[in-house]
Image (tube, rainbow, N blue to C red):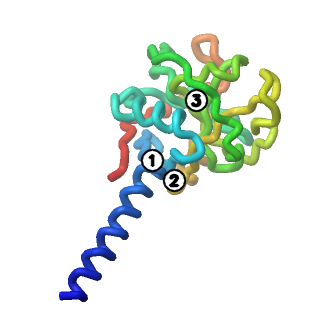
Amino acid sequence: MKIKIALLLLFALLAGGFVQAAETRPRVRLETTMGAVVLELDAQAAPQTVANFLGYVREGFYDGLIFHRVIKGFMIQGGGMTPDMAPRPTRAPIPNEAANGLQNRRGSVAMARTADPHSATAQFFINTVDNPFLDHRAPNPQEWGYCVFGTVVAGMDVVAAIENAATGMRAGHGDVPQTPIVIQKALLEP
């Protein structure tokens, strides 16, 4: 009887750890026309950013959007445009959590934004090289940085293939893949 109780307690503790890990490190699978990419998000370091991103995932917002800005030796950006280069309406911008200690390194996932540090909505990018100049240095518009909120844990080969896609001008935008690279589905992994 004592062994059964001890095993039940151990199982409860382990299950609690798995639940906590799922809450603080959720994973999102991006199924693209070039293959799958799995992102592990860091809800502890960037809670508002992760909640915002997961909200868009749960709504199906990213489904059918493209990687619309691809710069070899820098990053791939998506989450805002349809294949015909029309922007998809978003919710209000979120606060920039770039001062969280996470860095824009190869494979990290960060929020895209305008010159206003607190303008990020749904667009994100995956760093294809280390980009320390994008990191937070000071709380002013020039040095606020770009909030890293996760990392690629599977599919960096797909990220590399996207990075190497032929690009050009399209609908007034530069660095657009000539053949649309579509996020067919963004799914929260169990």
Q: Give how far apart the Cα atoms at labels 3 and 1 are.
A: 16 Å
The relative height of residue 170 versus residue 61 in the rendered view (above or below) is above
Q: State the SS at label 1.
A: strand
Who is closer to the viewer here, 15 or 117?
A: 15
- The residue located at (36%, 50%) in the rendering is 189
Say whether residue 6 is left or right of residue 167.
Answer: left
Residue 13 drawn at (x, y percent): 36, 69
Q: Earlier in the sequence, mark 3 or mark 1?
A: 1
Q: In which quadrant of the rendered view does residue 132 lie?
A: top right
Residue 104 drawn at (x, y percent): 71, 43
Q: Give how far apart the Cα atoms at labels 2 and 3 are.
A: 19 Å
The relative height of residue 20 versus residue 139 in the rendered view (above or below) is below
Q: Give how far apart the Cα atoms at labels 2 and 1 are.
A: 8 Å
Who is closer to the viewer here, 115 or 74?
A: 115
Identify the amino acid type marked 1: Gly
Q: Which label belongs to residue 155? A: 2
For mark 1, what is the residue? Answer: 35
